[in-house]
Amino acid sequence: MNRRNPLAGVFAKYFATSTVTETELVTPVMRRIRLVADEPITFPYTPGQHVRIQLNDPLSVYGILRPSETLRTYTIWDFDPGQRAIELRVHRYDGDGIGRKWAEAVRPGEPVTFWWPQGDFFTRDAPYHLFVGEETASAAFGPMLRALDGSARVYGVLESESAEHDLPMPGPHRLRRVYRAGAPAASSRKLLAAVADLDLPGEPGAAYLAGEARTCQLVRDHLVAERGWPRTSIKVKPFWTPGKRGLH
Ligand SMILES: Cc1cc2nc3c(=O)[nH]c(=O)nc-3n(C[C@H](O)[C@H](O)[C@H](O)COP(=O)(O)OP(=O)(O)OC[C@H]3O[C@@H](n4cnc5c(N)ncnc54)[C@H](O)[C@@H]3O)c2cc1C
């Protein structure tokens, strides 16, 4: 699609064309999608970074008129430059955004354009690490946890709808699980209560809060107000929130 757009040449170094080679459900609400790029993938990458999947061409008239209906952001779950492949884990939440519809409908053999990895949501050196979020956050925490040394001290809480919705996480580090059981994921008191219940070391570590925006805020406020963490020790990455389209 981009190759026919005269503007595409200007931006060519920022995106890759690829083909979907595999899709499968890894939980009832999480789809694994594997993309193999047409050309070797040479971009620098740190686990936790994301790509932007092009669902409508942002350089087309449609895209210029409706910029919020063009790109959707997904973390690179796995990166295999030798195979020119990236894998995603995409949440099939109950809704009808363009990302959600794509995740449902996409099949092997289909072309996909994605924009280069971006973002600064990755781990940094710290006495210990704290991960908090729901299903979409799990999709980002997987590669971040995999990249941590086995000796790293890791704490955290992952929320999902029920145990069968738990995304299996790679690596030796285990996070506490809590279940919404029908409660909303937005402003999740369940997740907040589980974080408040964690037995954390006395000094601050590095926190990574992702997923629904208002829940992220609640957890950040808890860490700052109740546990005395400086804001600089807390990375917050809101992934979605009711009423907003295509956060990135
Ligand atoms: C840096 C970053 C990394 C991300 N990584 C991943 C990832 O690896 N896997 C993943 O699945 N998602 C990830 N997301 C979240 C994903 O981009 C959003 O869920 C996105 O909104 C989906 O696009 P959409 O077109 O389906 O919905 P949109 O059009 O963007 O949103 C429409 C409405 O749908 C609802 N909605 C959107 N997402 C959700 C959700 N997850 N649960 C419940 N309701 C929702 C909201 O009410 C929203 O107002 C990431 C987001 C960011 C910013």
Image (cartoon, helix red, strand yellow):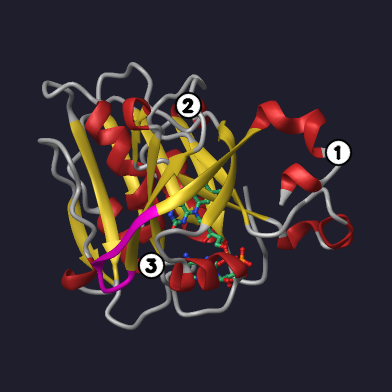
In the displayed structure, 218 sits above or below 244; it is above
Q: Residue at x 80, y 56 (%)?
A: 67
Q: Provide residue 48's location: percent of width, then percent of height.
A: 41, 35
Label 3 CA crowd tier, 10 Å (few <14, some 14–19, many 20+)? some
- Tell whether position 6 is magenta: no
Circles 3 and 1, Cβ within 8 Å, touching? The answer is: no
The stretch in magenta equals 21-29
Which mark is drawn over residue 41?
Answer: 2
| 61 relative to 98, above or below | above
Circle on res. 7: 1
Point out the tag, 3 or 1, that comes first from the N-terminus: 1
- Mark nearer the viewer, 3 or 1: 1
**Residue with the mark numbered 3:** 189
The disc labelled 3 sits on which kind of residue?
A: Arg
Left/right placement of residue 157 relative to residue 247 reads: left
Q: Nearer the viewer, residue 55 or 97?
A: 55
User: For the residue labelled by badge 2, is the local secondary structure a helix, a strand or a loop?
Assistant: loop
Q: Main secondary structure of the magenta part?
A: strand
| Cα separation between marks 2 and 1 | 22 Å
Q: Is mark 1 within 8 Å of ligand 1?
A: no
Query: Residue drawn at (42%, 66%), measured in percent from left and top?
Result: 107
Whole-number angstrom distance, CA of label 3 to CA of label 2: 41 Å
| Number of the label disc, if any, that sits on residue 87 | none
- Residue nearer the viewer, 192 or 62: 62
Looking at the picture, which amino acid does disc 2 mark?
Ile
